[in-house]
């Protein structure tokens, strides 16, 4: 994200020094977590710790409808993120690697709720009332999926750029600080606006040189390179690399396994550029070091402001307000009830997932739409059952074709002989045209006979394995119901833990010593690690660090704290309102062999002349 500190590759000493610094910051974070006055600063420290030990973070930014979401979908090879012109991305979404695919919604107050991957639309673009209430409280999403690219990099799909002051597009500064590389997406043929160019200039002041991605080359008739050159003439000195791609072509290529179309889309050039950029370990080390220097400045401002805010009295007032401010508490309750409502809706849908399933066709439709009903056993059965139904359809089509051809034969025979068709035929009654139609009928009959053999083969498998698969499907549905209950229970537990923490904090107002402890830790443990290590820090920055830490430790917070005990009511139990298991009994799948066997017309006989 920032310009290189120097041109030398990162040494093992630098990497070791960074790791040692991070190990010192972990206990500092634990110390500061005890104090809510520096909660936001503490959260930023945690992000520095997490980002230092995680994969590089790559951010995609741009205006609405330039194709950021489609571009990210093409990189991971699936339509994971909702791509809609009507409902643009409304939540910053971090794509991370995970063996178990799920969503973690991180709310503004620090609470985390886990969702099934199928709820991604609800949390990003859905316009239902519950979804809108939930999104009002979301800070960002973490989406965990199993994809090799995400083992190396975390990808961020961002909200669209907003209008800002001084005709400069606005983007979250706190998010920009976290990322290692920024990719700015333009729609091919659509020049950057003045507000966007001003943002690019502003990013440079933060040490960020965004890389330009021109999307939609399939619509540019070979003008991508000239378009990029024209844009570079305007503001190229403020950019990093530039690449042109077609996200739509890349998605289509991955769906159809079309290698040439994938090459034409140039998506591999973007992937290669990403790999090249994130492999720069020195840049990562320098970036984390800069972030911590910025964090020290923020910590200094926080600590210096505490005495003027009468911290102990203010602490009491904040805790009291948490309980007395009904509007604030009401919005939190609305959010929690909306989350419970979404869990309940999903639970109800799962409980009656098999309610309308009475045929094999309906079962296959259900398996195609509800992904939690899948495992290797079910997928094998689904494959054979699909072949069974396909051959049944083919046979019926052939039988109709046979019937129509037979009717033509009867009509032709009567026209030629004046008699109704009856077998066996006299040789004198068989004209060349009649013989040709009989030959066609026998060919169709042979095809019907082949289909009957396949149908009988697949039907035997479908019937033989029906009850085993049926039991497994009922078990998978029950497991999904249990998962929903666990997710809702975790939400309830977090709510209780949150209230318990506030109560504990109020009871320990007199023990406001964590800042004092943090001051000592910064001076004795962190400062030597910064100044005496191989970290890429200039002498000027070292002087700034010494001065900043001296200012932090100079603030006297050792005076006696104001202490007053508060009585807290216990939080409302959300689980008491959601007795899902009683309200929604699982309607199990209960098909019989008669339900899965298809009726087919009798096999036509061979017409012998």
Image: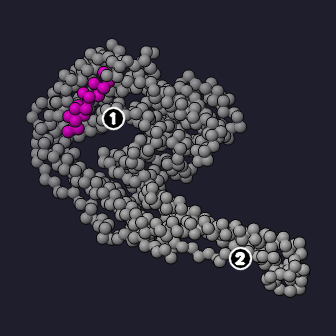
For residue 211, side relative to residue 321 (left or right) = right
Please indicate whether residue 527 sits to the left or right of residue 159 in the image.
left
Pick the front one: 452 or 516: 452
Q: Which mark is residue 605?
A: 2
Residue 97 in magenta stretch? no
Where is 396 relative to 35, above or below? below
* Residue at (42, 52) in percent of width and height: 117
Where residue 267 sits, quadrant-wise, is top right
Identify whether 437 is placed above or below 26.
below
> Hey, which residue is sitting farthest top in the picture?
539
* Residue 391 x/y as whole percent: 62, 66
Mark 2 against mark 1, which lies toward the viewer? 2
User: Residue at horizontal 51%, vertical 42%?
Assistant: 76
Q: Position of residue 592 (x, y in %)?
A: 46, 74
Percent position (x, y) of residue 529? 26, 20
Q: Count every numbered label the image shows and give the total.
A: 2
Tell me where residue 463 appears, x and y as whole percent: 49, 70
- Give the quarter of the figure containing the C terminus: bottom right
The residue positioned 11% from the left and 48% from the top of the image is 565
Q: Which residue is mark 1?
A: 50
Cα separation between marks 2 and 1 = 74 Å
Secondary structure under badge 2?
A: loop
Q: Residue at x 44, y 44 (%)?
A: 146
């Amino acid at each position: 994200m920032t310009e290189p500190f120097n041109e030398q590759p990162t040494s093992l000493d630098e990497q070791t020094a960074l790791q040692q610094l991070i190990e010192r910051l972990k206990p500092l974070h634990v110390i500061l977590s005890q104090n809510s006055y520096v909660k936001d600063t503490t959260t930023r420290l945690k992000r520095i710790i997490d980002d230092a030990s995680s994969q590089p973070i790559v951010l995609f930014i741009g205006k609405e409808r330039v194709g950021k979401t489609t571009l990210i979908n093409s990189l991971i090879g699936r339509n994971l993120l909702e791509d809609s012109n009507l409902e643009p991305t409304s939540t910053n979404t971090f794509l991370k690697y995970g063996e178990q695919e799920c969503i973690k919604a991180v709310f503004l107050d620090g609470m985390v709720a886990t969702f099934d991957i199928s709820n991604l639309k609800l949390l990003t673009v859905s316009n239902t009332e519950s979804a809108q209430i939930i999104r009002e409280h979301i800070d960002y999403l973490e989406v965990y999926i199993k994809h090799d690219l995400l083992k190396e990099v975390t990808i961020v799909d961002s909200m669209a750029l907003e209008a800002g002051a001084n005709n400069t597009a606005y983007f979250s500064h706190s998010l920009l600080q976290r990322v290692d590389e920024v990719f700015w997406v333009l729609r091919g043929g659509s020049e950057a606006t003045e507000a966007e160019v001003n943002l690019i200039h502003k990013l440079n002041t933060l040490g960020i040189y965004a890389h330009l991605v021109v999307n939609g080359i399939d619509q540019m008739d070979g003008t991508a390179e000239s378009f990029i050159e024209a844009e570079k003439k305007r503001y190229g000195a403020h950019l990093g690399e530039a690449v042109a791609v077609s996200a739509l072509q890349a998605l289509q290529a991955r769906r159809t396994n079309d290698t040439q179309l994938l090459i034409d889309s140039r998506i591999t050039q973007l992937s290669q550029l990403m790999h090249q950029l994130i492999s720069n370990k020195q840049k990562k080390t320098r970036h984390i070091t800069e972030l911590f220097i910025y964090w020290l400045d923020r910590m200094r401002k926080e600590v210096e402001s505490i005495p003027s805010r009468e911290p102990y009295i203010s602490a009491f007032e904040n805790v009291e307000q948490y309980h007395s401010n009904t509007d604030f508490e009401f919005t939190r309750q609305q959010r929690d009830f909306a989350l419970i409502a979404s869990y309940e809706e999903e639970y109800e849908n799962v409980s009656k997932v098999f309610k309308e399933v009475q045929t094999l066709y309906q079962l296959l439709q259900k398996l195609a739409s509800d992904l939690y009903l899948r495992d290797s056993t079910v997928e094998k059965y689904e494959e054979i059952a699909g072949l069974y139904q396909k051959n049944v359809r083919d046979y019926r089509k052939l039988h109709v074709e046979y019937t129509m051809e037979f009717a033509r034969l009867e009509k032709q025979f009567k026209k030629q002989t004046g008699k109704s068709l009856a077998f066996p035929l006299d040789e004198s009654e068989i004209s060349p045209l009649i013989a040709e139609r009989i030959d066609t009928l026998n060919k169709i009959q042979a095809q019907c006979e082949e289909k009957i053999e396949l149908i009988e083969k697949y039907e035997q498998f479908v019937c033989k394995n029906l009850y085993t698969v049926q039991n497994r499907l009922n078990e998978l549905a029950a497991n999904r119901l249990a998962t929903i209950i666990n997710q809702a229970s975790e939400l309830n537990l977090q709510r209780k833990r949150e209230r318990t923490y506030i109560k504990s904090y109020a009871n320990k107002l007199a023990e406001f010593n964590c800042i004092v402890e943090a001051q000592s830790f910064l001076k004795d443990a962190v400062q030597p690690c910064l100044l005496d290590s191989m970290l890429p820090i200039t002498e000027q920055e070292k002087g700034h660090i010494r001065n900043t830490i001296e200012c932090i430790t100079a603030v006297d917070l050792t005076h006696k704290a104001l202490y007053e005990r508060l009585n807290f009511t216990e939080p409302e139990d959300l689980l008491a309102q959601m007795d899902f298991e009683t309200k929604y009994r699982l309607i199990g799948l209960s098909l019989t062999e008669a339900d899965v066997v298809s009726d087919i017309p009798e096999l036509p006989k061979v017409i012998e002349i």
